[in-house]
Image (spheres, grey):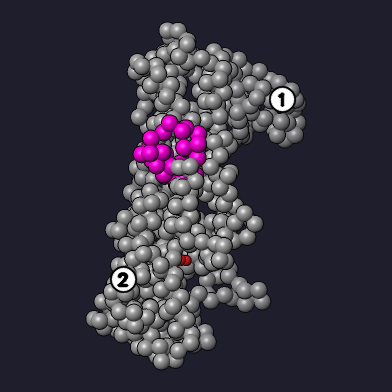
Amino acid sequence: MDLERLLTDRLTPAFTAVAGEPVAPVVRRSSRADFQSDAALALARRLGRPPREIAGAVLDRAVLDDVCAAVEVSGPGFVNLTIADDALAAMVAALAGDDRLGVPVAADPETVVVDYSGPNVAKEMHVGHLRSTVIGDAAVRLLGWLGHRVVRVNHLGDWGTPFGMLIAHLVDLGEAGAAQELSIGDLDGFYRAARSKFDADPEFRARARQQVVALQGGDQEARRLWRLLVAQSQRYFLTVYRLLDVTLTEDDFRGESAYDDRLGTVVADLDRLGLLTDSAGATCAFPPGFTGRDGAPLPLIVRKGDGGYGYPATDLAALRLRTGELGATRLLYVVGLPQRQHFAMVFAVAGQAGWLGPQARAEHLGFGSVLGPDGRMLRSRAGESVKLVDLLTEAVTRATALARTKNPELDEASAAEIGRVVGIGAIKYADLSTDRTRDYVLDWERMLALDGNTAPYLQYAYARTRAVSRRAGTQVGADARIVLGEPAERALAFELLGFAAVVDEVARTAEFHHLAGYLHRLATRFSAFYERCPVLRADGELRASRLLLTELTGRTLRQGLHLLGIRTVERM
Ligand code: ARG
């Protein structure tokens, strides 16, 4: 158990007895002692007693001798707690002997559907899809590690009216030509060419319309051409996933088309529940609480005037399948913030229909934009949106060059490997280490810096722990006695004990920047420890203890980075 919680558990009954009412003594790390609670200050006014007196009474009652070496009232009425070295050492030793680094498997495993990545067929993935893929991948890893049953869903945009023009364009190019164009990953070129013909040429437009009708009517030939487009695009997306080193596979594609035959039922059922109204020819839901600027209720269009279904109907059908048939109790949608209202309305309607509720919750994990150095939306020099593969390739190239400059003796293969791990890690970490609801600037210098809150800094810290272990020669047993004397040693120990709490928090909130911040703090503490506490030059018990702390730090860094989808190397 983490120390904040342990101390809170010990102080709560004492505070509650003194106050005569339930009190939550917020226990925090403190620079004055190891931990501090300022709950007495907040209570003073309510109880009409001086805070120091309250704090004193609490300390008289609280059972702390087995954990604390010193307890005192300080300043205006803080409770200061200093953890006993042997208690701290015992906790660290328990951690060292635990494969899971103190992180328990979930007591009530859930079925969690994570909807992420979701690129669109015959369209380039953009940085928004990058963010979704990276954040979703981290969610999948973390929840899976905690023992939840995680279902990955790649809600591919593979259906709808644009496919008429895409198929018509494919027919014009000939299958071989189209396949060639798509396989080199020039999806945007393909899409743009189709679009401009559609805009300029009425004859093409007519053919495009016929193709949509044929496709939706189940025409064999139209379906075959459509499948070709989908397959080529999927193949391309998979190369991006491989480069990005994420867990998405081809089995995870569950495109919008997969729900096509359910849309009618979904709308009919919503109608039966009295949730639908005709509005200007379209069939709409008006979930309570959603109004436009003019105060009028906002519609969620479930069937368009022409009888077609769109994005909202598909999401309703997908949601119903996930909670109803897959038995999911938690749904995560990793999609950019511009779609916030869409998801809020879909969830509201699903709630009215009983497809969501206390038994199954849905969360939109929205995220901000990636900005260029000029603080505007990231664009290529030609002013187009940046191609994802180019971005990834540039990261790897830069990281490889950097690895070579830092270490000229590196052989080609190692430099390439380090470049890949560090370059991709840096991109992912830059994303995951900022509050996901905020925009962030893609700044190569900063994200590849060897110091600061960056992937390379953490990967380097990990490699350093490995180097120390290698040089020590002997394997330290996980049963080595932990000796804690130096402040830097204790600070490292406290940080190591905090891993479980941060993992637990992130599992609830999907705010991965807290895990990133934790790992950065841990690496910083390790660095201070390493500077002040000789490891290899220490003797006997102290040496073994410090080696164990070093290894435990390495394991925690590696596991934490792994949960973020970031790899490590043994040497850098
Ligand atoms: N294809 C969509 C886009 O590019 C993202 C899909 C998100 N998932 C969903 N269930 N709507 O914006």
Q: CA distance from mark 1 to mark 2?
A: 73 Å
Which corner quadrant of the image does residue 545 belong to?
top left
Name the quadrant where ligand 1 sits.
bottom left
Circle 1: is it few (<14), some (14-19), or many (20+) Cα within 10 Å? many
Q: Position of residue 389 (x, y in %)?
A: 43, 57
Q: In the rendered image, which residue does mark 1 sit on?
A: 77
Nearer-the-camera pick, 119 or 336:
119
Q: Mark 1: which secondary structure? A: loop
- Residue at 37 percent across and 27 percent down: it is 98
- Can you tell which of label 1 and label 2 is closer to the viewer? 2
In the image, residue 14 above or below residue 135: above
Circle 2: is it few (<14), some (14-19), or many (20+) Cα within 10 Å? some
- Residue at 52 percent across and 21 percent down: it is 530
- Residue at 61 percent across and 33 percent down: it is 26
Q: Position of residue 354 (x, y in %)?
A: 42, 65
Q: Position of residue 470 (x, y in %)?
A: 38, 21
Q: Position of residue 499 (x, y in %)?
A: 47, 33
Q: In the rendered image, which residue does mark 2 sit on?
A: 179
In the image, residue 458 above or below residue 220: above
Q: Mark 2: which secondary structure? A: helix
Quarter of the image where the C terminus is located:
top left
Identified by mark 1, the residue type is Gly
- Residue at 56 percent across and 15 percent down: it is 486
In the image, residue 183 above or below residue 438: below
Nearer-the-camera pick, 359 or 393:
393
Nearer-the-camera pick, 338 or 395:
395
Callouts 1 and 2 close, C-beta under 8 Å? no
Identified by mark 2, the residue type is Ala
Q: Which residues are magenta?
A: 402-426
The answer to if 404 sits in the magenta stretch is: yes
Lateral position of residue 301 relative to residue 20, left or right: left
